[in-house]
Amino acid sequence: MDNLTGKEKYNYIMSVLDIMYPDAFCELNYHSIFDLVIAVMLSAQTTDISVNKVTDVLFQKYKSVDDYINCDIKDLEEDLRFIGLYKNKAKNIKLLCQKIKDDYNGQVPMKRKDLESLPGVGRKTANVVLSEGFRIPAIAVDTHVSRVAKRLKLAYLNDDVWTIEQKLMRKFPRERWHKLHHQMVFFGRYHCKAQAPDCDNCQLKVVCRYPKIDVGRAM
């Protein structure tokens, strides 16, 4: 595989991921784009499984920005207590909802700069909302995408998430960004794990640097 051109390598990676995870999807549960924003915010430093357990109840209790704005902060903290950083997340949810109401007529904005202006929303969250919620092509670089990109030599070991995002967008077709993001998350979450990746049963090991360098620790 060392003699593959860049484009051939990228096509090979996409073809393998298509075989492994043809139906990769967002594993966060949500009913609306507003719910999606909340769910992605809550997923920071927390597993999707933990978030889904919380939002299963949360989204039945709070259905609008006003519901969050008008609730007692202590009650919201109690609703979120099973996930990491729950006090800070509760504060940001209330601030975010107030801003959505005041500045965007109660609707989640669909421009990146507006999304990133919301409390608790960084570039990764904005990218997920753009891609998953509005179907605007974007690649969100979380810990799984970052690890996979570095191991598959799509990025350097010392690249930050912004640099990785830009490189992935240059290397892969825009129409594949949405699907590719979910496939890379699935690949990193279930196969190319931070610890003990399944290299023996991996068709991508021929384009991977992991056997030589443990980038799980390098990250």
Image: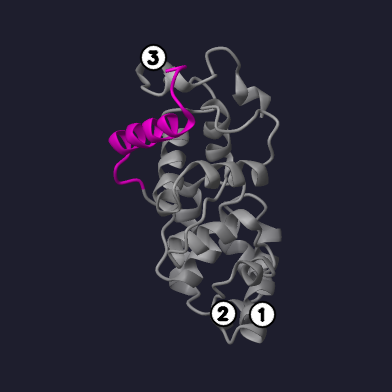
Quadrant in which the C terminus appears: top right
In the rendered structure, the answer to whether residue 100 lies left or right of residue 138 reads right
Task: Please state which of the two labelled residues, at mark 1 or mark 3, is closer to the viewer.
Answer: 3
**In this orientation, which residue lies closer to the viewer: 183 or 206?**
206
Residue 34 x %, y %: 50, 72
Q: At x 31% / y 34%, what residue is drawn?
A: 20
**In this orientation, which residue lies closer to the viewer: 161 or 2?**
2
Q: Disc 3 on helix, strand or loop?
A: helix
**Res 122 → quadrant:** bottom right
Q: At x 51% / y 63%, what residue is drawn?
A: 130
- Residue range in magenta is 1-24
Residue 91 x %, y %: 70, 67
Residue kind at label 2, given as amino acid type: Val
Report the predominant secondary structure element of the magenta stretch.
helix
In the image, is residue 11 above or below residue 54? Answer: above
**In this orientation, which residue lies closer to the viewer: 107 or 70?**
107
**In this orientation, which residue lies closer to the viewer: 89 or 165?**
165
Contact check, label 1 and label 2, Cβ < 8 Å? yes
Residue 212 x %, y %: 57, 12
**Mark drawn on residue 98:** 1
Q: CA distance from mark 1 to mark 3?
A: 50 Å
Q: CA distance from mark 1 to mark 2?
A: 7 Å
Q: At x 61% / y 41%, what residue is drawn?
A: 164
**Res 210 → quadrant:** top right
Residue that carries the numbered disc 3 in the rendered image:
200
**Res 72 → quadrant:** bottom right
Q: Disc 1 on helix, strand or loop?
A: helix
Residue that carries the numbered disc 2 in the rendered image:
65
Contact check, label 3 and label 2, Cβ < 8 Å? no
Give the mark nearer the N terminus: 1 vs 3: 1
